[in-house]
Amino acid sequence: MKRIIITLITALMMFSMTVMVSAGELDKNEKEVLNQLTNKNFPVKIENRYLNQLENYLIRDDVSVAKEDVEDVVSYLREALLAQKAYKQNKSIDNFKKMYINAEKAGSLLHLILEYDSSVGKFYALDSEGYIVIDTVNPIKNTGEEKVAEKEWNFSVEIFFAIAVGLCVIGLLANFRRWSRKLRSKHQKEYDDEEDDELEVASRKTRRARRQTFTYVNFKEILKYFYVPIIMGLIVIGIGYAAFLSTSEMWGSASKNFLNTQPIYLTNDSEAQPFKGDEKSQREELRLHGITIPKFSQRYGELACKDLKLDAPVYWGDRPEQLAKGAGHYIGSFLPGYGKTILIGAHNTTYFANLEKVKTGDEFKFTTTYGIFRYKVVDTKIVDKDFDKAYDLTADKEQLVLYTCYPYGTLNGTKNQRMFVYLDRVSGPSIKK
C-alpha cells in the first residue's frame, strides 16, 4: 500500500513539474508555427521584429496553440502576406479584403484581435484583454521630437477656395478690357464737349482728379466685375461641400463596417512588483515559466547609471504614451536574461538627457521584476539613416541597445539622426528556455 502511495505521489510530482516546464515556454506546436514561418520555403519573408513579437506572445503562460490549428495558422498567414504583397502592387479592394480577412482568421486561432490604427495607417494585434502584442509601428522613429500640432485647413475646403479665387481672377481678366474701354470713352467725351459752361468744366476736372487718385468710385467700378465669379465660386463651394459630406459619410460607414479605424489598445498604468532581493542572493539561472511577461505599457523595470545621473523607469512598449513616462522597451526585442537583443529608447530631452555624455566602460544597472542585471558600454554610434541596420534582432548574444534622437539641444533644427549605445551583459541571471 505504501509503495502505491509513493508511486502516485511521484507520478503527481513528475506531472506537476512537466506542467510547470511547459507553462510559459514554447511548446511543440508553438515552435512548429515559428519554424514554418522562418522556413526558407515559406513564400514571403517575415521581418524578424514581427517574429520576435510573436515569440514573446507565445511564451506567455496563458497562450497555447492547438495541434490541429498549426497548419491553419501558417496557411492563413501565408495567404494574408501574399495578398499584402499583391496589394502593394495593385491597391484593389479585393487584395485588401483578402489580406485583412486571412490575417484576422490567423489571429483568431492565436486568440488575437486584428485592429487598424488610422493615425499611423498600420495594423496591430491585441490580446484578449486589449493590450498590444504585435505592433507594426517603426520603433526608432518614435523618439523623434513631437511637433506642435498646427491647425490645418481641410483639403477639400482648400480646393474649393482655390476654385473661387480662380473664378475671380478669370472674371477680372475677362472684364478688364471692357472696363478700360469704358473709362477711355468717358474721358474722351469730357474733352469733346467744348460748349459746356465753366461749372461743367470744373466738374469734369474734379472727376479726372478722382480717377487719377484711384478713389472709392474707381474701386467700386472694378469690384462690380467680381460679383458674378464670387457668387459662382460660393455656389461651387456649396455644391462641392454637400457632395463631399455625402461621400465621406458613405465611406465612413463602409470603413466602420469593414474594420475599426480607431486605436482601442489599453494603456496599463500598473507597475509590476520590483525584485525584492539583492544581486548576491539572486539565482544564476531562472526558468522561463517563473517569469511573468509584462503587458503592453506596464512598467516592469528601472534603468540607472550613476556616472550619468540617469534613472529611467522602463515600460513594455515604446509608443509616445510610454515614452512620455519613461524609457520604452520595444516589444520586438527580448527581456534581460533571455540571451538576445534588448532595444530600449527614450527622448533626449527627458530620461536620456545625459546619455550624450556616455563613455566606453560606463556601467548601467537594470532592475527588473525577476532580477538585477548589469551592462557595460562597449560602443556608441551616430546613425543618419537606415536606423534598423544599427541593431540586430536576430543575434544570439545578449546585448542592451539604447537609442535616442540626435543631435542634442533645442536649437539644432530637425533631429533626423539617432544615437545608439551598445552594452554587453556583465552580470545577472540567465533565463533557461
Image (spheres, rainbow, N blue to C red):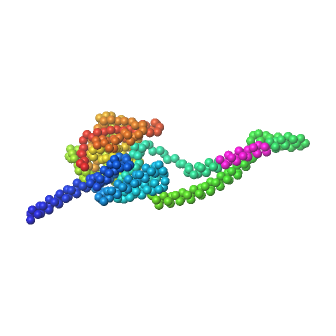
Q: Residue furthest right?
A: 195
The image shows residue 277 at horizontal and vertical percentages of 23, 48
Q: Position of residue 134 (x, y in %)?
A: 37, 52
Q: Looking at the magenta stretch, what is its main secondary structure?
A: helix
Q: Is residue 319 left or right of residue 290?
A: right
- Farthest-out residue, bottom: 1
Can you see residue 264? no
User: In which quadrant of the rendered image does the N terminus lie?
Assistant: bottom left
Residue at image position (52%, 58%) is 251
Residue at 58 percent across and 51 percent down: it is: 157
Callout count = 0
The residue that appears at 32% across and 51% down in the rendered structure is 36
Please check the rendered image and state whether residue 237 is part of the magenta-colored stretch, yes or no.
no
Viewer-proximal residue among 78 and 178: 78
**Magenta highlight range:** 166-183
Extreme-top residue of the structure: 360
Where is residue 89? Give x, y as percent.
Answer: 47, 49
**Residue at position x 54%, y 48% from top?**
152
Residue 109 visible in the displayed image:
yes
Position of residue 43 measured from the top left corner of the image (x, y, whole percent): 37, 49
Q: 49 or 412, which lies in front?
A: 49
Q: Is residue 48 left or right of residue 119?
A: left
User: Residue 168 in magenta?
Assistant: yes
